[in-house]
Amino acid sequence: MGREFGALAQARALARRPLRILTGLQIARTGLRLGFAAATALVFGTLIMSGEVSPMVAAAAPALLLLAALAGLALDIVQARAETALSGRLRAAVGARLDAMPARQVQALAAGRLIVALQRHPEAVAALAVGHRSAATMMAIGPLIAAGALALVSWQAALLVLALTPVMIVFFILLGGTIRRRAQAQEEAFGHLAGQFADRVRTLPTILANHALPAEEAKLGGRLSAYADRTMAVLRVAFLNAAAIDFFSSLSIAMLAVFLGLGHLKLAMIPGFSGLELWQSLFILMVAPEYFAAFRRYAEQYHAKAEGEAAALALDALMQAAPVAAPVTTLPAALAPGALPRSGLVVITGPSGAGKTSTLRLLAGVDAPAGAAPPDALPGPVSWIATDAFVPGGTLGAAIGWQVAGVTSPRLMRAASEVGLLNDALLPGGLDAGIAEGGTNLSGGQRLRVAIARALLAGGPVLADEPTAKLDPETAAGIRRLLAEIARDRLVIAASHDPALARQADRVIDLVRPALPEAAR
Amino acid sequence: MTAPTPSPAAQDAGAAASRVYWRRAALLALAGMLCAVLLGGLSAWFLGAVAIAGLSTAALTFNFHVPGALVRLFAVGRTVARYGERLAGHKAALTDQVARRVGLFRAMADAPATRAAGWQMADQARLSDYLDDVEDLDYARLRVGLPGTVLAISLAGGLVATAIVAPLALVPPLALLGMFALAGRGLHRRAFVCWDAAKAERRDGAARLGATLAAAVPLRAEWHWSRQSEAALARFDAADGRLLAIRRMQAGLDAAGGLVGPVAALSVIGAAWLAGGRGETLLVPTFLAFAWLALGEPLQGVSRMLVAQIRRDAARRDNAGWLRPAQAGATAIAAPAPRRLLIERLQRRAPDGRPLGLPLALDLQAGRACVLAGPSGTGKTSLLKQIAGWTGNDTMRADSASIDAAARRAMAMYCPHDAAILADTVRANLFAPGRDDAELDAALAAVEMSGRVAEAGGLDGWIRQEALSLGEAQRLNLARAWLSDRPLILLDEPTEHLDAAQGERILARLLDRLGDRIVVLSSHRLDGGLAETIRL
């Protein structure tokens, strides 16, 4: 395993400060809501019993309502901002980790999974570290505040809702176990059926190519139904969680209403429920559900928890992948930093697996952290010519002139025509030919020629990996001529099988196959 | 191709079942809402009534059993109805989901884009985006339609009751609701724009990051890596920024929504008092006021409905592309199977439809495999797809009969170079339901996959794309060609990802087996050696 990434630990550390603010706002909002409940209960209680209400109280009710709403607004916005900021920080941490990775390790990553992970996972981890955490904190504080408010009026009523809580928690524990067991059984029996729709959409052309559409369609319908049935079996238990909170909240209202009613009728002397004013009874009735609200909000975060934990694990797995060993670690003496000429064509030849490409990579320092040149590499950026050259989206002209300083239109024209891209039947439109993001509409040969045209315009040394392979003989001859031309005043090092290119070289370095074969590239 | 499955009758049954579940969910949701509203109103009324009765001897005759029992009934009813609503709603949504997804799969299969160059859903980021869209559609009714309907009905009920009990009290909540509706419409428009932009930025970021990762080595060598990867990640951050803007709007909407119930409650009691209500005459307004408090609760989360609606609309629009008119249906294979396909002038075309080079004459015969050779990027795959009838509408001849693209689609087994492995059993992956185990085993042996398949648990072992190497996937793909009964077999780069000797061995066996079919294969490695080579 590589160095620990710890997405969740990083997120938790970053979330500490915003969580303090969030908790403060939560407490303020709860206090204001309780204040509103008290004022409203007073309005109703005194109006019914005496026909009058103090103007102060009548004004306080809407004012507290508004303040509570504003506190809620601030709470939502602070939480959203904190989660977004945290998501950006996590993404940047992944970016920094990628910068520090050797290029061979970056290449070994599952690109599709990494892209999806960077798109969505930081958000999910942030929601777990901020939103879910804040709801969990509030589950501890919120009910206590509500119970405290109840106790101000009747400590026996507070005790009653407090006494319901352990019962509810025991219920949750029992339920939680059942949910986990069901979900696990579901995962074992039907886990392989999850994602069948996605899988069949992904493989659709293969299904069509094999004339399997009717069979696969019928199978898909059956499997989706089976999976939906099992999902319902899990939901039936999972929804009991919310139902339990609903039940205890409803139960507390029903019990309190009856006790308080008997107290008012003076039919029974129940300590704490007799001799209360109407407003006090109404206040108890309004606050009791508030006691359970924090539990409900926490239960609603169930998905955020599951998703956040899965996202954090996925990010860790990607970032902590086992290091990929370097196939070649030392340069041949002839290529050592001091031994290279300032200009000329150097061709590295040798059988497949001798480490030609790895030697080029070593010279370019690509397996060092981004933007740093290790001691045995060439001391600065080079032009890299290969079929995997980077091609930005846009036009052919922009792709050739990408990141080259001071390019003029005539020079672009010349470079493009030198590599035969101006009259390429497969890429019509000259310099204005459209290029998809990442050059996905280009063939390997076309990308290679874009890279050569760029190298013609740029300064500095050139490293070329198999520059004439996969090309037709005519184009290959043109490329050889261009490399020789660049080599007149710059250093060009090419790894190549091509004997014709080796004949043109000022220096040929023949690598012999090492004891260990070159690792899969 | 056979008739689409599931049968129309089964589909109707499914639709009928889903209607029943939706109706049940709506009724339960309304019942739950009614219980919650009555629970709030009745318990407040009850306390007021007993407090007044307690002042006099009426306390002794006050029947508190009925209201007490009703309070318990509504309390239990609220719990049960909400649980039932959740279950019925999810059952309905899942029932619809199955039908919708099968329908979408069918529509995608019929869309011409599926057979054109480069399957976009093979890209994980694109597939994830698409699945998000599908899910937004799957759950739209549960997240928008159902709660929206219940909310509208209960609000209407509350307003009617208020008009009867204290008409003057209608003014504040109506004003608030009116402002709310106006603001909601504006927010809807702005949030939709934000969501759209966020989706586009995510897509763009994914494309950029994909290009950056694919070019990791050149970018590192040229010292452009950090800037490129930062630029790609910045697109994701920009998308997050848009989503933050939506969440701000949501926060405002929810804060305003939460005001409606309490404002209505205070208005009702205030209006009743101003109208001269005192003592017992205030009990009914109290009932209504506390009912409003319960009624207003769902409005605290109304923004979630708005967002679900926006996502549904955006997903519907983005998915519409897959529902364009289908390609002409495939016809039956001409019998007897043709042993020769001819065309004098086949205009080769690039994936975007541009003509490539001069027209080509093809004479494809059974038993004489034809190799399309040439360096990368010369259009070998495009030509194979044209021959397969997947693209273009060229007509070829077989003896005297003319064979159009649809007919060739029906008679061709096209074996793409990036053929996918389905998450399924090995047997299902071979696509040969009519063949017995011995034949399947022989095919696997021919492509040197017997050992690997035994490791995976035999013919009924479950395999996934990620569990196989590229070479193993390629060999399994060739086993599909081995087992195919189609008269025209098209192999794109059959030896790619295989080492040279193994590739030659397997290809020789495969061509021997397919001696009675018309076989065309492409290769940038093979050149000559086989009966016929066309250089592109």
Image: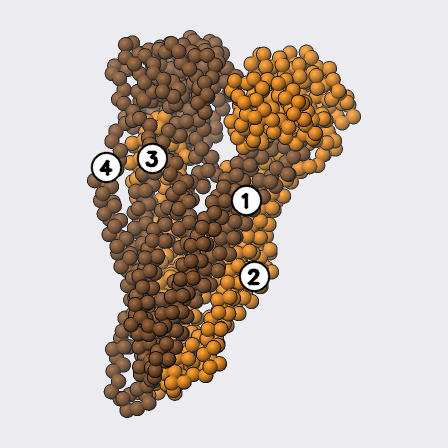
Chain colours: A orange, B brown
Three-letter code for the amino acid on which mark 4 is drawn: Ser
- In the foreground, B223 or B343: B343
Q: Is B113 in front, or is B80?
A: B113
- Residue most toward the left? B9
Foreground label between 1 and 2: 1
Give the residue number, with chain letter if any, for mark 1.
B236
Do marks 3 and 1 share a subunit?
yes
Q: Quadrant of residue B217?
A: top right
Do callouts 1 and 2 mark residues in contact (Cβ within 8 Å)? no
Disc 1 is placed on an element classified as helix
Q: CA distance from mark 3 to mark 4?
A: 16 Å
Q: Earlier in the sequence, mark 3 or mark 1?
A: 3
User: In front: B217, or A459?
Assistant: A459
- Determine the CA span between mark 3 and mark 1: 31 Å
Asked if residue A305 can be seen in this view, the reply is no
* Residue at 33% from the left image edge and 82% from the top image edge: B277
- Quadrant in the rendering for residue A362: top right
Dot 3: element: helix
Q: Residue at x 41, y 51 (%)?
A: B308
Q: Is residue B440 left or right of residue B466?
A: left
Tell which subunit mark 4 falls on.
B
Please tell me whether residue B242 is drawn above or below residue B212 in the rendered image. Answer: below
Q: Which residue is mark 4?
A: B7
Per the image, the residue denoted by label 2 is A19
- Of all chains, the one bearing label 2 is A
How packed mark 2 is, by other alpha carbons closer than 10 Å (few <14, some 14-19, many 20 or more), is: many
Q: Position of residue A3 (x, y in %)?
A: 61, 44
What's the residue type where badge 3 is placed? Answer: Ala
Chain holding disc 3: B
Q: Position of residue A380 (x, y in %)?
A: 72, 31
Q: Is A50 on the left or on the right of A106, as rendered?
A: left
Q: What's the residue at 78%, 26% (across, down)?
A: A338
